[in-house]
Amino acid sequence: MGSKDGALKPKTATKPRLKRPRLYKVILVNDDYTPREFVILVLRAVFRMSEETGYRVMMTAHKLGTCVVVVCARDIAETKASEATDLAKDAGFPLMFTTEPEE
């Protein structure tokens, strides 16, 4: 009969592991010139926040200097940050939104 050296071993199927895309934070940077009402208006228009949530985000940025508005995919984060910053620039305010990778 056959020897055990030639026995067939079952093949293990390996699936390639796909890394999830890195998430990015959109950060609201506080300034001393943009009116609070305008900041809330931008948060509602661009980030679809309620009046109350927009107020809380704006106050957090006011007290701490910055506040994370949303965490999402890189292209969405950059688009929303530039849209919000451009909206403020068009209205004549120095309001700024930045993006950075989430840790």
Image (tube, rainbow, N blue to C red):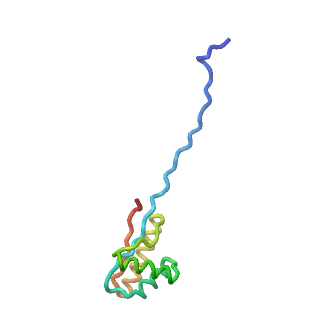
Query: How far from the left and from the top, in percent, is residue 51?
Result: 50, 84
Residue extending farthest front: 63
Above or below residue 59? Residue 21 is: above
Above or below residue 1? Residue 33 is: below
Above or below residue 51? Residue 102 is: above
Residue extending farthest top: 1
Query: How far from the left and from the top, in percent, is residue 47?
Result: 49, 76
Please indicate whether residue 29 sits to the left or right of residue 72 in the image.
left
Q: In what quadrant of the picture does the C terminus appear?
A: bottom left
Q: Quadrant of residue 93?
A: bottom left
Please indicate whether residue 62 sits to the left or right of residue 18 in the image.
left
Q: In what quadrant of the picture does the N terminus appear?
A: top right
Query: How far from the left and from the top, in percent, is residue 94?
Result: 33, 82
Between 4 and 62, the residue placed more toward the observer is 62
Residue depicted at x 65% and y 13%: 2
Q: Quadrant of residue 82?
A: bottom left
Above or below residue 10? Residue 29 is: below
Residue extending farthest right: 1
Q: Number of marks in the image?
A: 0
Query: How far from the left and from the top, in percent, is residue 12?
Result: 59, 35
Between 98 and 54, the residue placed more toward the observer is 54
Please indicate whether residue 43 sits to the left or right of residue 2 in the image.
left
